């Protein structure tokens, strides 16, 4: 039994802690409330990148050799509305002297290439990484302005402000028809594993479920893992099954926007909650092998717990939620130091980058994987 896929039977095995009985009577959040002590203790820095006429999303930071913070982010024109990311996003780079300063837009890195290309209609989900002397920019593109052609790609460069080699083909393709991941590949998360291989985590879901389910959230988003001997691939999926799967839980629980980092031999994930606790929190999970994950704990709370802002116009229905969480490690790479995210609002009534300083990390006192072993 993989601890990443939780069944009703698995939850009942934890009844000695009094969790399951309450869980099935109400919600897990009320049964075991972590809201008073999330994994991250955060100090808000604020909206660090706002652009007139644009929505901003997907803020991926990295320390530059110049000592500055370089931010790879996605943006699309305001007139397209919140959904414009799917059919008109481009990936850009901004700079700031430190995470405490405002970021300034510098250049467009990747734009949709038009008819005939796999990334014809959007470029989104940037994730910037450095391995040895090469920069790797993982991203998502699509070819028809819809979710079913979303594919993960990889651009490379020797410098953050230099020329980027554009991929002719996607880096990772969906599964065969009927597979859990037959719809798309998106939301890349990347780290070098303890096995010496390069790990690429990706989000996907099943097309039939997505097309036939009803409700505000259709389909169930899960995470898979592919590995390669080199950062540029080729990548091979480790299993036909996802490594993180909440689909057996109530309320169509799922997660998205995963970011992975390595610390003291363990791998950590921060992601956006989509029904495990609610749709406002961040989640924190850990693993040693990339396959067996601990039960999610609350990583951070809804934005309203940290800052007070005026209520936005009605078209910003997701106001108060921090999405696309990304970590900027300390310069020595040893600890998470800043949390970057995207959130609706700001002076231009669109969406912006929002930055927190990480003051402290709390260690959970229990491990769901161990509790479920029978």
Image: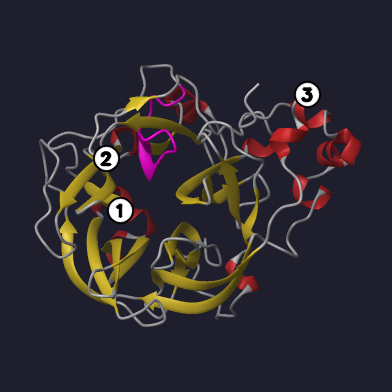
| Mark 1–mark 3 CB contact (< 8 Å) | no
Q: Quadrant of the N terminus?
A: top right
| Mark 1–mark 2 CB contact (< 8 Å) | yes
How far separated are the C-alphas under marks 2 and 3? 39 Å
Residue 43 falls left or right of residue 211: right
| Residue 231, numbered circle | 2
Q: Is residue 355 above or below residue 62?
A: below
Categorize mark 2 by other alpha carbons within 10 Å: few (<14), some (14-19), many (20+): many
Q: Is residue 130 above or below residue 166?
A: below
Give the image location of residue 83, x and y in percent: 36, 53
Q: Quadrant of the C terminus?
A: top right
Q: Which residue is mark 3?
A: 9
Q: Mark yes or no: residue 174 visible.
A: no
Magenta span: 180-199
Q: Which residue is mark 1?
A: 129
Nearest the camera: 146 or 137? 137
Give the image location of residue 201, x and y in percent: 41, 38
């Amino acid at each position: 039994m993989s601890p990443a896929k939780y069944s009703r039977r698995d939850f009942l095995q934890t009844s000695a802690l009094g969790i399951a009985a309450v869980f099935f009577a109400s919600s897990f959040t009320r049964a075991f409330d972590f809201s008073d002590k999330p994994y991250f203790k955060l100090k808000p820095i604020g909206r660090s990148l706002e652009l007139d006429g644009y929505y901003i999303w997907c803020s991926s930071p990295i320390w530059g050799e110049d000592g500055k913070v370089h931010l790879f982010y996605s943006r699309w024109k305001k007139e397209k509305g919140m959904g414009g990311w799917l059919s008109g996003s481009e990936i850009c780079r901004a700079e700031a002297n430190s995470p405490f300063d405002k970021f300034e837009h510098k250049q467009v890195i990747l734009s949709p290439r038009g008819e005939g290309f796999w990334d014809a209609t959007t470029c989104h989900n940037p994730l910037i990484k450095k391995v040895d002397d090469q920069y790797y920019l993982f991203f998502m593109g699509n070819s028809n302005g819809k979710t079913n052609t979303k594919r993960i790609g990889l651009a490379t460069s020797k410098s953050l402000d230099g020329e980027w080699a554009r991929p002719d083909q996607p880096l990772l393709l969906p599964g065969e028809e009927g597979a859990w991941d037959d719809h798309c590949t998106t939301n890349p998360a990347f780290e070098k594993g303890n096995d010496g291989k390069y790990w690429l985590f990706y989000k996907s879901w099943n097309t039939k479920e997505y097309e036939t389910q009803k409700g505000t959230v259709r389909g169930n988003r899960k995470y898979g893992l592919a590995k390669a001997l080199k950062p540029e691939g080729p990548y091979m999926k480790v299993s036909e099954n996802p490594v993180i799967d909440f689909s057996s839980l109530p309320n169509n629980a799922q997660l998205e926007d995963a970011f992975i980092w390595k610390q003291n031999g363990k791998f950590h994930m921060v992601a956006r909650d989509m029904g495990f606790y609610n749709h406002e929190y961040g989640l924190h999970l850990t693993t040693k092998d990339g396959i067996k994950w601990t039960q999610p704990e609350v990583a951070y709370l809804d934005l309203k717990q940290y800052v007070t802002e005026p209520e936005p116009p009605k078209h910003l229905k997701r106001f108060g939620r921090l999405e696309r969480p990304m970590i900027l490690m300390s310069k020595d790479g040893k600890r998470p130091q800043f949390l970057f995210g995207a959130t609706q609002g700001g002076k231009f009534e669109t969406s912006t980058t929002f930055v927190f300083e990480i003051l402290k990390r709390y260690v959970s006192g229990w491990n769901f994987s161990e509790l479920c072993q029978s």
